[in-house]
Amino acid sequence: MIHIRHPQAAAWLSAAILSFVAGAANAADIFATELGADVAAVAADVKISMMNGDGDGADSGRGPVPYLKALGKPPARVALVSFYVWDCGNKKESSYRIYGGNYTYHVTNTRKRAVGEGEVAVLANELHDAGIPALRDSFAAVGMQLLTADEFLDTPAKREAYDAFKMEAGGFSGLLRGLQEKSHGDVWQWGAPDGYRVLELTTVGNVKGNQFQLGQTGISIGKTAAALGYDLAAKLGVDAVVILYNVVQADKTTINMRGAGLYMFGPNPVPNSGQSLYWNGHQYSGVYLRMKDIPFIKTDKNGNLVEADYKGYGIVAGALGKRMAEHVKGKTG
């Protein structure tokens, strides 16, 4: 034991220790270390994920592939209708204890403790606040305005429509989701930030293979695109909607980022004139970044926070947004 008799020295040491502890959670640059700090370079590793092929579509507006050249430019107002974090296992681990008690947000100090059900929702708030600025910038570079929940839900009618919205996955997608829920429903956890709903997209869900890109094709993705890109977009008064999800996995002393996906849906760019095989909604774009267990949160064996890199998540959100923005701009001509 160290005894310090001088009161000023004791006060200095106490302040130094508190400063070190307070800074520990923000000191790491874990995402930059694992991925690199250059968003453009990370964007080059982001994969295009178009569920009915990455074609140019038909100028007649028929079929499952959108003819985005009819838009002439990227959609102007794009609503982020869902942002969520999905823990794909290890519910028993103690890593999430850091979000209990008198938790203090690291990205912003304006939030209160109560943010929803479960610790994953708290993590979702941290990542959302850290990633939105970079995602906005990436979209703005091609003329798209990203709208968050507090911006596109600007009337009671829109809030009611959003809260009542149901997204059903049929066909193979429904079977795939059923199998996933049956085998992993007791351990998988989802959480969304304040104001958002978890509008879950059905992914491949291959935990061992680290594959979490969208798993819907054909009529299945058509139903999702019609619900999100046509029905919901119209009720919200926007030109397109996007969903961003993050796949994490808690371990004994870490929470690891394993992948993230960003998918855009909108109305058929060609008006409906009664043509056959007409789809009301389309998947405009889709991108996915596969990551190899990035330990962006580290704890001790008792679940006490050691360090966390929330702000570094902006690299991920920015890279996803940049790849999508460039893809949409290219397709709209």
Image (cartoon, rainbow, N blue to C red):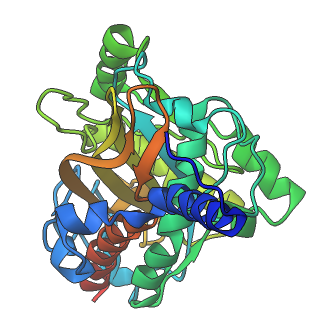
Q: Position of residue 141 (x, y in %)?
A: 40, 91
User: Which of the 4 quarters of the picture holds residue 283?
Assistant: bottom left
Which corner quadrant holds the C terminus? bottom left
Q: Which residue is drawn at 24% across and 84% down?
A: 330
What is the count of numbered marks? Answer: 0
Q: Where is residue 178 in the image (x, y as percent from the top left)?
A: 37, 15
Q: Is residue 181 above or below residue 137?
A: above
Q: In this view, does 251 lie to the left or right of 268?
A: left
Q: Which residue is drawn at 26% across and 74% down?
A: 323
User: Which of the 4 quarters of the picture holds residue 118?
Assistant: top right
Q: Is residue 292 left or right of residue 312?
A: left
Q: Report whether residue 230 is seen.
A: no
Which residue is situated farthest in the right direction here? 156
Q: Position of residue 326 (x, y in %)?
A: 27, 81
Q: Nearer the viewer, residue 325 or 3?
A: 3
Q: Which residue is drawn at 40% across and 59% down?
A: 309
Q: Which of 95 and 81 is in front in this view?
A: 95
Q: Report whether residue 330 is seen.
A: yes
Q: In this view, does 108 lie above or below 228?
A: below
Q: Where is residue 237 in the image (x, y as percent from the top left)?
A: 68, 68
Q: Residue at x 67, y 51 (%)?
A: 104
